[in-house]
Amino acid sequence: MSSFIETIPGEYLAVASSLVYAGTLVSIRRGMVGSTPMAALLIVNSIVAMGGLAGAAFRGTLFTVALAPFFWFALVGLLGQGIGTLTYYNGIDRMGVGRATAIQSSSPLWGAIFAILVLGERPGMAVLVGTVAIVGGVVLLAVPEDWDGKGGWIQSALIYPLISSVAYAFVPIFAKIAFSFQKSPYLGFGVAFSVGTLTMLMGTRIFPTGGRIRMNPKSFGIFVGAGVLNLLGAIFFWIAIVGGKVTVVLPISRLYPLWVLILGALFLGKLERITARVVTAGVLVVVGGVLTVAFG
């Protein structure tokens, strides 16, 4: 299967990754009744970590990894799956999911800047416009309709999703550096999610609620399913990074808020009121995605 996936252009894998990740988020939301976010994160991340390490063992890269790529993969986990996730959910705890997600959604812009400065990528104007359109659309989808613009943004909690956006932007950058030594995507996300899971466990004290871990049996089954979906999304995203450009793959992989809106209506019975802002956001995301795929 992986050999076939590796023949698919990176931009299409990024779209697939965003769609699968949207399914992960919808599943987690279904399992959140009677459970805590930290419980969901630990189960999902652990499944992705074990899946990646098992895939690396099957492909013969688990025990042949050199120190240099291992270091960069571990750094990806520390920053992205570790610090990035902790600060994002801490921001949600302190300022709400809408505003935290809107700020955190600036990650592709940071990623484009880092890719240009560190990797020497030279995206065309269409790709840059597409990236801005995707980010703008995601921000519009993320901010609550009833938010009046007062409070929330100019406060100390702003720093958490902002740190998260920068941390996640470094994920494909450091992965690209690691792949310059050894092209092993399964090993990459296996190590990254393992380090990220350990980082989350050590960092639960930063949450206002203490990062409690609690769940019921039904939620456990749903979280396992979400973990399998996230594993598939990680395969798509990391293989996309191997052959694709960060300035193309990263913004396209962030299309998931649009898919969450659609999947939420289909499977959660959560019908979003179609307003001018929702339509504008959808158009921005779609146009941005088309520009990035067509000209990336």
Image (spheres, helix red, strand yellow):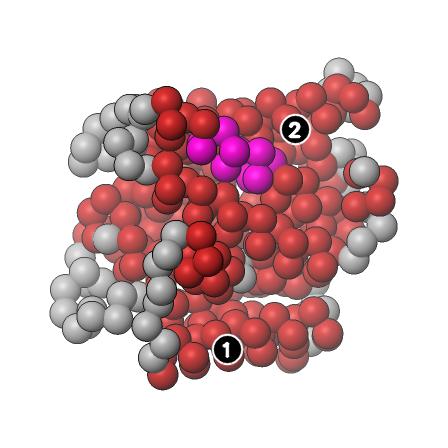
Q: Which residue is drawn at 56% across and 74% down?
A: 286
**Magenta span main SS:** helix
- Identify residue type, mark 1: Leu
Whether residue 107 is situated above or below residue 66 in the rendered picture? below
Quarter of the figure with residue 287:
bottom right
Q: Is residue 229 magenta?
A: yes
Of residues 85 and 174, which is closer to you in this image? Answer: 85
47 to the left or right of 182 = left
Residue wearing tag 2: 52
| For residue 24, side relative to residue 215 (left or right) | right
Crowding around mark 1 (Cα neighbors within 10 Å: few <14, some 14 to 19, many 20+) is many
Query: Is 152 drawn above or below residue 94 in the view shown?
Result: below
User: Which residue is label 1 attached to?
Assistant: 284
User: Residue 129 in the image: x percent, y percent?
Assistant: 57, 78
The amino acid on which the numbered mark 2 sits, given as a three-letter code, is: Gly
Quadrant the C terminus occupies: bottom right
Residue 124, above or below 239: below
Query: Residue at image x 26%, y 31%?
Result: 34
Q: Can residue 115 be seen in this view?
A: no
Whether residue 231 is visible to the viewer of this picture, yes or no, is: yes
Residues rendered magenta in the picture: 222-231
In magenta segment, residue 68:
no
